[in-house]
Image (tube, grey):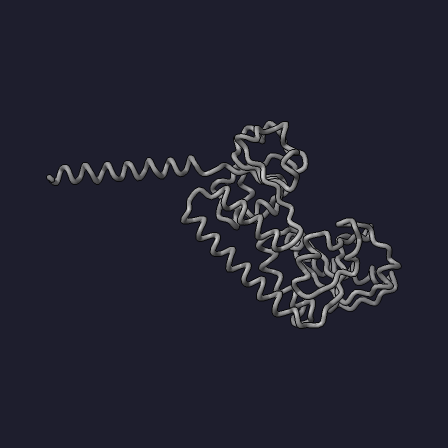
Amino acid sequence: MTFKHTIHRFTLSLALLALNQVALAKEAPRIISLSPHLTEMVYDLELKEQLVATDNFSNYPPEVKDVANVGSGLQPNQELLLLYKPDIVLSFLPAHHYETVFDSSTVNVISSQPESIPALFADWRKVLVIAQADEKKRLEVEKRIDNTETQWLELVENYQDKASKSVFFLISEQPLYSVSDKAFLSQAIKSCNTQNIFSEIKLSSFIVNPEELLIKKPDVVIHGYKASHPESKQESRAIILALFKNLGLNLQAEQLISVDVDILHRPTLRFINTLPEICAAIHSEIDH
């Protein structure tokens, strides 16, 4: 074989490699996310290059601001949904909600509103298998999911022998709102060996009777604050401590656990990564 033939064959190989890469790029499904927690999932699963649009409440990671949005996750703009030609739509609503918008044979609508941490891991794996066409990348991310799950199981084991703490989840002050064990947040915080004082309520979220709160007297109160506002944490804590005092419950500052609201109320990797800190605060191992 001449040097000229060798160069020709090498050039041909590069061309075929480039064509294969283009083909793989075309095979990568286009994704629209219609919920902040699902947008975070896309980034956590390293699918961001496939994300073509989101809902208008998705705000993390910061770079998502450069991605087009299609409006509210509850009522997205149908024309925009079709304009961005998704192969996959991620939503917290059931798939049948989009039957009149998409052809189910061409668009895969995946619903994810996990009620527990194991369900969250299952959703990650489901989306990854469907959305990641590159097997090598998929296996790498699967390994990270496995490691995260192992760390979570170790956390649960570390706290299972500690004295259980009773918890009240303060979702809003006016009206006084909370969640039951039907909500992801309550189930997830059980990792820290806790008992939701309103675990038995049949609704996932509900208005609280202040008298019942006084009777149950939780060990800790968990609430969210807007981390985007520098003074929000201290202002929120002061308001809540005053609220409980007015209700007749002398809540101490160390009983109040403050968490970035976007982390607290989203089933995401950020929540899982923050959970050890929350558990430590519940059991008074760190300042909070």
Quarter holding the C terminus is bottom right
Q: What is the number of callouts on the image?
A: 0
Residue 243 percent across, percent down from the top left = 83, 59
- Residue at figure coordinates x 75%, y 60% from the top left: 196
Query: Would you identify the image quadrant in which residue 240 lies?
Result: bottom right
Query: Would you identify the image quadrant in which residue 212 lies?
Result: bottom right
Would residue 14 be visible to someone looking at this image? Answer: yes
Would residue 229 be visible to someone looking at this image? Answer: no
Asked if residue 106 lies left or right of residue 239, the reply is: left
Residue 142 percent across, percent down from the top left = 48, 53
Vertical placement of 243 versus 203: above or below?
A: below
Asked if residue 51 lies left or right of residue 281, the reply is: left
Residue 105 percent across, percent down from the top left = 54, 30
Asked if residue 21 lies left or right of residue 249, the reply is: left
Vertical placement of 69 versus 260: above or below?
A: above
- For the residue pair 209 and 144, the one nearer the viewer reads as 144
Query: Would you identify the image quadrant in which residue 1 lies?
Result: top left
- Residue at figure coordinates x 69%, y 67% from the top left: 282
Residue 227 percent across, percent down from the top left = 65, 55
- Residue at figure coordinates x 74%, y 64% from the top left: 256
- Residue at figure coordinates x 48%, y 48% from the top left: 46
- For the residue pair 33 and 164, the one nearer the viewer reads as 164
- For the residue pair 279 and 124, the one nearer the viewer reads as 124
